[in-house]
Amino acid sequence: MHLLVVEDDQRLRRLLKRLLEEDHHVVEVAADGATAVELATGTSGIDALILDIGLPDVSGLEVARRIRATGADVSILMLTARDTVGDRVRGLDAGADDYLVKPFAFEELSARLRALSRRGAAGARRAEPKLIAGSIELDETARRVTVGGDPIDLSPREFALLECLLRHAGQTLSRDQLLDQAWPFSVSVTPNAVDAYVHYLRTKLGSASGQLETVRGIGYRLAHG
């Protein structure tokens, strides 16, 4: 992968660059948020960011928001010394795909990067700005969902779940597959969470709720409509 390490601690920045290059990644580095946004949204071909939350100019949360606002096709793994539920939620809602608390083992960082890479390949993350099935339309760039032209309000997790189902419209996905693609790697949830969020989605989809089908004993499928 082509990685960008955004870390203001010079010692840690150099260490991560060396270890990641030994792990066969191409690695760029940045010490501040402005440089990070420029590199991540430019023509450098960055696949993923390893993004520290505590930066000298702007926070990593703001960096993630700015990158997501551009629609740049890049995964974000956020690093932080804070480990409360509120901190994790803010990071994920800002646009992070995963969350790793300092101090961490390099083996775990490497494993999470592999998981992000698999998800990108399997889900073709952000490959198309709009996904359509029947009366359901999801505009990923605008983070907007409509049913029959009428907008519906989804939480970030509901949005991610619907996006995954739309990308695989007509295909049956197991609960484990949905967890792998629609939930961040760092969030501990059970397959029952999928059932709960499918229920929430059906309620909000209204007239299009019938498109979200239960495949008994396996999982769920979004019909083309």
Image (spheres, grey):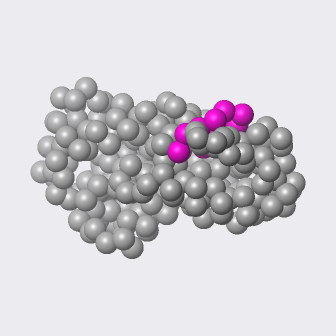
Q: Is residue 70 visible?
A: no
For residue 210, above or below residue 88: above
Residue at position x 38%, y 38% in the image: 115
Q: Quadrant of residue 103?
A: bottom left
Q: Residue at x 76, y 58 (%)?
A: 205
Residue 214 as seen in the image, left or right of residue 80: right
Is residue 173 inside the magenta stretch?
A: yes
Labels in figure, total: 0
Farthest residue to the front: give it. Answer: 217
* Rendered residue at 65%/50% (across/down): 162
Q: Quadrant of residue 102?
A: bottom left
Residue 162 is at least partly visible in this image: yes
In the visual, does 102 lie left or right of 124? left
**Relative image position of residue 10 (x, y in whole percent):** 16, 52
Where in the figure is residue 198, as x and y percent of width and height?
A: 63, 56
Looking at the image, which is closer to me, 165 or 93? Answer: 165
Q: Quadrant of the C terminus?
A: top right
Q: Position of residue 109 (x, y in %)?
A: 25, 44
Specify the quadrant that holds the N terminus. top left
* Horizontal and vertical percent position of residue 83: 28, 68
Which range is magenta?
Answer: 164-175
Q: Is residue 4 magenta?
A: no
53 or 163, which lies in front? Answer: 163
What residue lies at 25% left-to-right and 59% top-to-bottom?
A: 101
Residue 63 relative to residue 14: left or right: right
Establish if 32 lies above or below 24.
Answer: below
